[in-house]
Amino acid sequence: MNANKALITGITGMVGSHLADYLLEQTDWDIYGMCRWRSPLDNVEHLLDRVNKKDRLFFESADLNDMGSMLHIIQRIKPDYIFHLAAQSYPKTSFDSPADTLNTNITGTCNLLEAIRISETNPVIHVCASSEVFGRVSKEDLPIHEEVGFHPASPYAISKVGTDLVGRYYGEAYGMKVMTTRMFTHTGPRRGDVFAESTFAKQIAMIEAGLLPPVVKTGNLDSLRTWADVRDAVKAYHMLVTINPTAGEYYNIGGTYTCSVKEMLDYLLSLSDKKDITVKTDPERLRPIDADLQVPDTRKFQKHTGWKPEITFEQTMQDLLNYWRERVGSGHKYLSR
């Protein structure tokens, strides 16, 4: 009997690469990773030997904004499972490039789902939206459950509202097995250096290596976040598509440890032997508007699947800092962004 086939859009990202790791280890599926020809391969460097040997892992060049490439891949691979993770995923960039963000995340998702519909395949589909869809919520709405209204606070968040609704539409209108997730803050090794906790860890690693003066530059430190580990997140995504997948359903997923961005930074600083590091607000790192209360109610997803996060906040942050120490120590050059 042939193994199941899974397609991961955005396999070269933090989440996509960890999902590939998890599926290769925990299943016998063949994994097809969709990426653009110019996508950086840093996050999947450890997997390239398997790709070269065609050992259950295959890379496919395509672009969400090119409908033809989507249709070609779906018709040729005929995947049993699709994890749609590819996106313009950085909220701050979306303020500078709103149209590109909206096009990639909304129209790109539509292109993928339309290609699946036209090809008359019937995969189980995970569409990854974001907790950013909830945006600016009041304290009375905490913790945030699935029916809290959307109040997006960036073009990125607006694009993920579109992603969410497009996914649910295809599930309801065509009976396609589409499920949408709103994952709250998740991080760990391979986190992009434009995100707060990762840029802090990278700056600390560069300071320890003598590459930067002992000053960590920050944006808004007052936002409240509930932290999850990316390795728990990808386990949740696997459970999503394999445990009674229900067309058109939508779930909040996230961790259990909540603290402010400042408290997260203080913990990272406590892990460093350099005790002379100071903190300075950088106006360029501030968003015009911020989603400052991101605390999830995940009971719906946990009841449906039995999933729960297992990796502690402290372990996640230690692994993130050690990831950057290793990257910086290996001679890679980085911007101080």
Image (cartoon, grey):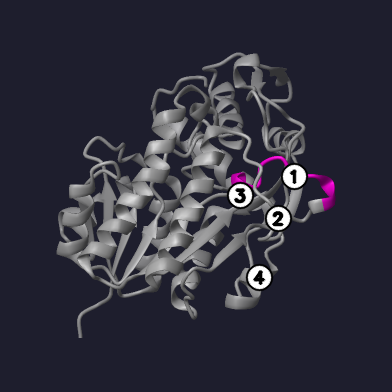
Q: Earlier in the sequence, mark 1 or mark 3?
A: 3
Precedes in sequence: disc 3 or disc 4: 3
User: On screen, 48 above or below 20?
Assistant: above
Q: Answer with left or right where residue 57 lies relative to residue 176.
A: left
Q: List the residue tagged with mark 4.
A: 300
Q: Which mark is residue 137?
A: 1
Mark 1 and mark 3 in contact? Answer it, CB < 8 Å. no
Q: Residue at x 50, y 54 (%)?
A: 165
Mark 4 burial class by Cα count in 10 Å: few <14, some 14-19, many 20+: some
Counting residues from the N terminus, which is met first, the one under dot 2 or under dot 1?
Answer: 1
Residue positioned 79% across, 53% down in the render? 142
Residue contact at pointers 2 and 1, CB within 8 angstroms: yes
**Picture coordinates of residue 281, whole percent (x, y):** 70, 18
- The type of residue carrying mark 4 is Lys
Magenta residues? 132-140
Residue 138 sits in quarter = top right
Q: CA distance from mark 4 to mark 1?
A: 19 Å
Foreground mark, 4 or 1, reads 1
On the rendered image, what quadrant is the N terminus found in? bottom left
Q: Nearer the viewer, mark 2 or mark 3?
A: 2
Secondary structure under tag 2 reads loop
- On whether residue 134 falls in the magenta region, the answer is yes
Q: Position of residue 102 (x, y in %)?
A: 43, 37
Residue at position x 24%, y 77% in the image = 3
* Residue named by callout 3: 131
Classify mark 1: helix, strand or loop.
Answer: loop
Name the mark nearer the viewer: 1 or 3: 1
Q: CA distance from mark 2 to mark 1?
A: 8 Å
Query: Quadrant of the rendered structure where residue 79 is?
Result: bottom left
The residue at which mark 2 appears reads as 148
Q: Is residue 10 left or right of residue 210?
A: left
